[in-house]
Each structure stands twice: as structure tokens, then as C-alpha cells.
Amino acid sequence: MTPESNDPIGRSVVRRINRRIMPFLFLLYVIAFLDRVNVGYAGLQMTRELHFSNEVFGFGAGIFFVGYVLLEIPGSILVEVWSARKWIARIMVSWGIIAALTGLIHTAHEFYGARFLLGVAEAGFMPGIIVYLTHWYRAADRAKAIALFMSAIPLSQVLGGPLSAALMNIHWLGWSGWRWLLILEGAPAVVLGVVTLFYLTDRPHQASWLPADERDWLVRELELEKRLKAAAAPRSVWRALSNRNVLLLTLGYFCGSTMQYGFSLWLPKMIEKLSGLTPIWVTLLSAVPYLAAWPAMMLVAWNSDRTRERRWHVAIPMMIAGLALLGSQYTGTNVALGVAMFSLAAMGINGRLGAFWALPTAFLGGTSAAAAIGGINCIGNLGGFAGPYIMGFLSTKTGRYGVGVAFLVGSALVGAAVTLLVRKPEKA
């Protein structure tokens, strides 16, 4: 298949898709990720007001992912065989409502229940989008496309810091700022869920916004790629899920999610302890590491597509993230150096994502790829429970974050090693 960089019609098609679809998907994921992790900012006030220990907060933050795994595989398959826009719209409306209702909790069990239901509501969103992108981008263009979409993660936290700081200053109706933060940040998902039904296009052959020649070209290219992969790929969902590479990627993603969410949900608390600043300033300072993460994410994905190499573009950022997290524990009271280490960690954590999600579709296609992506995300995202909870448990038991950070470092290094065991795809 001709690489996009050497194919004029390929360049034109990618530009049109990037202009039409990608900004909207990007916006959806900004909202999704903000609703997923804004509890980290809210926790600066919530834990004091509701008298939650670090262990309670870590369990509640992480239980989101227990609910999240329930619909991952069927959700991904529905995007492949039914309708992406309808499934994504359903997800957004339900999660927006539950995210807003989280602002009304008063007890630990209500906190656990709201976070669990939020996970159930959002299940299938991210892997569904990854499957949806395979309907529009060829393998040669996919890491950049996935990285562009997933760069919403650092951007959501760059925007989330100042926005959350502003919302935590609101005290309408006598309610604390953290409640309004959760309520008001849930509302946009409901609105955008309705817009999704009218804006997204499920498949290229339905895209009236593409010129006929480009539409026909894209359909032919994707069909050819699908047939070539189908000839070599497992022919059943269960065989795809038990594929050696899929199992290794699942373990690698579990380790990566453990590191990612243990870091992101506890970053405000770690900066608060390091700096001694007020919650508002801590929230603003927590955005700094993600300013560095976005360009790193795009650079790694660009180089991965340029070289057609995936595994080392996942493993090296994970190693860097682990070593930076380790270094953050030796900065003493130097806030600038500590934030610099956290920034380097954020660059590695986010930098791995584009190349990682290009790997499953490098050796699987169609329903098998959809099931594999759902399975990897389903089991792998249990790390999103393990990371925050173990960080909270260990910090409660020891009175410091160092032991929990050491656990995240170990997860990063194991994840890097496991990814390198994945058999090299032919021209990923």
C-alpha cells in the first residue's frame, strides 16, 4: 500500500478526514477524559469535607474502571457491525448525566456507586473510537491519527487545571466548589451526545462531504487492507482474544494504565504535598506536566509512522516515564525540579499511546480487530483501578507517596518489557 506521504490522493483524503472528523472526536475525548479524572482535582476539597482517607479516595477513583470493563468488547464490536455514531451518542448522554450526579454524593458508598456507574456508562467509548478510526484511516496513517485523537488526554488536563480551579471557587446555593466542578463539567457530554447523532458519518461510502473519486479510492484501499489482514488473521473472536500478541498487549496496557491513572489521579495530591500550596494553585500547577506531554505525544507518533516501527515507540516512553517518576521522589522540596520530573513522566505516559493502539490493527482486521481492541482496553484498563487504589492504600499505610510511586515505576518497566515481546508486525 502506498504510504500517504507519497500519494497525492492519499494526502488529500487524510486532510479532509482530519478537518471533518478529527476535531469533533478530539473534543469528545477532551470532555470524556476530563469527566474521568476531574475527581483528582475535586478530591483536594472533597476528601477534607467528607472526611475520606487516601484509601477511600483511591478506591473510589479507581472503581470507575471496574464498571468500565463490562461493555468494552461488545461495545467495540457494535461500532464495527452496527453504528459508531449511535453507540457513541448513547455513551455520552448517559455518562454526562451520571458525571453531573456525582457532585451530589455525601458518603463513601455513594462515591463508590457513582464512580462505578460512570465507568459502566462510558464503557466502550475509547476502544469504539479506535475501531471507528480504522474505518477512515489506512494502517500507514493510523498512529498519527490515534495520537492526534488521544492527545486530547494531556489537553484535557491542561484545560482541566485552570477550569477546575475556577469552578472550585463557586459556592452557589451553599454548595462547595468541588460539587459544582463535577456537576458543570458533566453537562457538555449530554449536549455533544445529541450533536454526535447528526454530525458523525459511520462509513466512508456514506460521506457526502468527500469528493466521489476520493470516497471511492478510500473505500477500495480500506477493503484491500481488510482482505489482506483477514487472510492471515484469526477467524473467530475467541481466537483473536487468545492470540499471543493480543495477550501480551493486554498485559502491557494493564501496566501502562496502572502507571497512567495512578499518576494522573494522584498528581494533584503529590504536588500539594510537595509545594504546600492552596488547592487552587495546586490545580493550576497540575496542568504544567501536560503542556509538555502534547508535543511529545505527536512527535513519537509521527516518528512511529515515519519508521513504521511500533514496539520501541511504546517501550522507550514507558521506560522514560518510570525513571522520571522515580526521580520525582528525590527532588526534596524543590518544586520546580519536582514538576519537571512529573512533566517528563507525563511525556512518556502519553507518548506511548499512538504507537500502542496502532499495534492491534497491524496484525488483525474487521471484527477480530474490534474484539481485540475491546479486550485489550477491557482487561488492560483494570490497571486504572489498581494504580489509584494501590497508591491510596500504600500512602495511607506509610504516610507518604514514595512506596506507591515505586509500584508505578515497576508497572512501567514491566509494561515496556512485555511490549517488546510482541512479535514484530510486518510493516505495522
Image: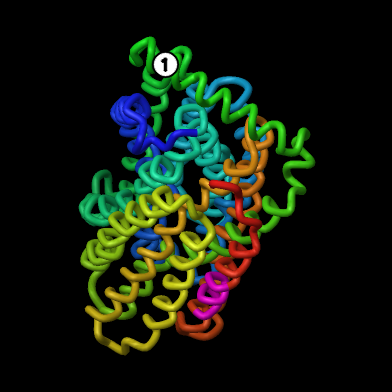
Residue 88 as seen in the image, left or right of residue 297: right
Q: How many numbered marks are there?
A: 1
Q: Main secondary structure of the magenta part?
A: helix
Query: Is residue 428 placed above or below 400 in the rendered structure?
Result: above
User: Picture coordinates of residue 401 (x, y %)?
Assistant: 46, 80
User: Picture coordinates of residue 173 (x, y %)?
Assistant: 27, 44
Q: What kind of colouring is applied to the model shown?
A: rainbow
Is residue 411 inside the magenta stretch? yes
Q: Which residue occupies 59% across, 48% down?
A: 426
Foreground pick, 272 / 402: 402
Foreground pick, 148 / 7: 7
Residue at which label 1 appears: 215
Question: Is disc 1 placed on a helix, strand or loop?
Answer: helix
- Residue 261 seen anywhere in this rendered image of the structure: no
Residue 336 as seen in the image, left or right of residue 306: left
Name the image quarter holding residue 83.
Answer: top right
**The magenta segment:** 406-413
Residue 172 as seen in the image, left or right of residue 53: left
- Residue 404 seen anywhere in this rendered image of the structure: yes
User: Picture coordinates of residue 114 (x, y %)?
Assistant: 53, 47
User: Picture coordinates of residue 206 (x, y %)?
Assistant: 46, 12
For label 1, the crowd category at 10 Å Cα-Cα, with few meaning under 14, some 14 to 19 and many 20 or more, is some
Q: Which residue occupies 62% across, 41% down?
A: 374
